[in-house]
Amino acid sequence: MKKELRKELKARRRNISNKSVSDSKICNYLTESSIYKNADIILFYAALDDEINIDECIAVALSQGKKVALPVCLDDEGHMKFYYIDSLKDIRTGFFGVREPDADICCEVVDFNHSICIVPAIAYDKKGYRLGYGKGYYDRFLKNFSFISIGLCYNELIMDVLPIGEYDIPVDYIITQNGILTI
């Protein structure tokens, strides 16, 4: 069921109109939010081509002196670690063809105090549950920490309800091109 839903919603995401305008609005809502402004560390991800392009958000955070970290996938079992970057040039293509920090030159995050985590997804529902990519990386990561998590999503991909599993963890907020949804 989730596999077919992923396929359908990914196709819908590829056809979002005015994608770059929506991406900029989402980044602006994030970087202007009090949640973001009160955080010292922002745990981003490097977006895939059809995801919301958050390179703008990453660049803003770096220019504001925020500590910025991105994940490195360690294996295909859903394990990952976050590494600080100093610029977008610290990102290379890694596991699964996903852009990630170069772990040879970047420092691992060991203290997550005052962090917020930006969580990728194909779609979210109104309770904050996400339809991810099926490997469980973020659910495994989020279960071990108690910081604020934020999903970025196109408004067209906010569903009433998504199928959830026992290990799925909802985000605290969702930001779309229309604003911030508190869960």
Image (cartoon, rainbow, N blue to C red):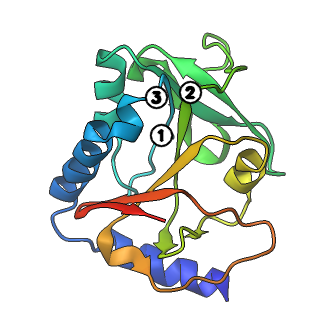
Q: Which residue is mark 1?
A: 46
First of labels 2, 3 by sequence position: 3
The reply to whether callout 2 and callout 3 are in contact (CB within 8 Å) is: yes
Position above or below: 135 against 89:
below
Mark 1: which amino acid? Answer: Ala
> Is 166 positioned to the left or the right of 45 in the image?
right
Occupied quadrant, residue 93: top right
Left or right relative to 136: residue 44? left
The picture places residue 171, in percent across and down from the top left corner, at: 56, 58
User: Where does the image place residue 67, in percent across and percent down from the top left?
Assistant: 48, 19
CA distance separating discs 2 and 1: 21 Å
Q: Residue at the location (45% across, 79% down)?
A: 9
Instruction: Please tell me which residue is depicted at 77% across the width and 50% down the height of the picture.
Output: 143
Of labels 3 and 1, earlier in sequence is: 3
Q: Residue at x 30, y 17 (%)?
A: 64
Q: Which mark is residue 104?
A: none
Q: Nearer the viewer, mark 3 or mark 1?
A: 3
Residue 93 showing in the rendered view: no
Q: Measured along the vertical axis of the image, is residue 142 above or below residue 42?
A: below
Disc 1 residue crowd, few under 14, some 14–19, many 20+, Cα 10 Å: many
Q: Where on the picture, by quarter, is residue 56?
A: top left
Which tag, 2 or 1, sits closer to the chain's start? 1
**Quarter of the N terminus within the rendering:** bottom right
Q: What residue does disc 2 label? A: 114
Task: Name the element at disc 2.
Answer: loop
Instruction: Judge whether residue 75 can be spotted in this image.
Output: yes
Q: Say if mark 3 contacts mark 1, CB within 8 Å.
A: no
The residue tagged 3 is: 39
Residue type, label 3: Ala
